[in-house]
């Protein structure tokens, strides 16, 4: 199964993606982890990505697409994967279609985690304090949410038109959301 997990920053994608991928026995692919690894290793792409991340902007499609393309070519994705944080733009959807087409595959399910915006800000401020993440100041969080609405929200309509979009509430305790996701993929 090939799944895309979507939702605004702070919706719980990372937390839920790991659990759901393990439950299904598929690879969890987090673009956030890929970005942080490149930033930490101070690669050329990582340094470029950091400038955008620190400003609350998305990393350019060309950089992101290249990272994802290489990751989807790895052996552990042959039996499926869960993408967490990609695609985020219409252009990335098109590129993902091209990448998967070359692999003889397509997206089977897109899950949108829905949350209250005030809850997202609260979650991200708390995470910032706990993890010391420079990309999670309140000002940057609010900008990221604006960018999400501007660039990512239109993807939902595209996936809805394909008949692969399902929405799940990301509100409540982690276990409650996990159970909702388990029920969704079991149906």
Image (tube, rainbow, N blue to C red):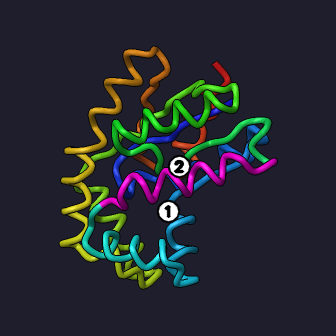
Secondary structure at numbered mark 1: helix
Question: Does the magenta portion include 72?
Answer: yes
The reply to whether callout 2 and callout 1 are in contact (CB within 8 Å) is yes
Q: Which residue is mark 1?
A: 32
Q: Nearer the viewer, residue 10 or 85?
A: 85
Q: Which residue is mark 2?
A: 84
- At horizontal 56% and vertical 65% (from top left) the residue drawn is 33
Q: Percent from the top left, x then y, of residue 116? A: 27, 47
Q: Percent from the top left, x then y, of residue 2? A: 64, 32
- State left or right for residue 109 relative to residue 147: right
Question: Does the magenta portion include 26?
Answer: no
Q: Nearer the viewer, residue 76 or 111?
A: 76
Q: Nearer the viewer, residue 2 or 168?
A: 2
Labels 2 and 1: the sequence-earlier one: 1
- State left or right for residue 116 relative to residue 19: left
Residue 173 is labelled as: none
Q: Nearer the viewer, residue 182 or 95?
A: 95
């Amino acid at each position: 199964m090939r799944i895309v997990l979507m939702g605004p920053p702070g919706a719980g994608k990372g937390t839920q993606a790991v659990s759901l991928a393990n439950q299904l026995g598929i690879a969890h692919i987090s673009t956030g982890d890929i970005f942080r690894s490149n930033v930490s290793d101070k690669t050329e792409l990582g340094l470029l990505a950091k400038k955008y991340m620190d400003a609350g902007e998305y990393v350019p499609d060309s950089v992101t697409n290249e990272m994802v393309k290489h990751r989807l070519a790895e052996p552990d994705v042959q039996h499926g994967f869960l993408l967490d944080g990609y695609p985020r733009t219409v252009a990335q959807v098109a590129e993902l279609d091209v990448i998967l087409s070359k692999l003889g595959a397509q997206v089977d399910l897109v899950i949108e985690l829905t949350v209250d915006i005030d809850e997202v800000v609260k979650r991200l401020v708390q995470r910032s304090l706990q993890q010391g993440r420079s990309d999670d100041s309140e000002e940057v969080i609010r900008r990221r949410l604006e960018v999400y609405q501007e660039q990512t929200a239109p993807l939902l309509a595209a996936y809805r038109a394909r008949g692969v979009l399902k929405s799940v509430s990301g509100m409540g305790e982690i276990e409650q959301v996990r159970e909702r996701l388990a029920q969704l993929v079991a149906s």
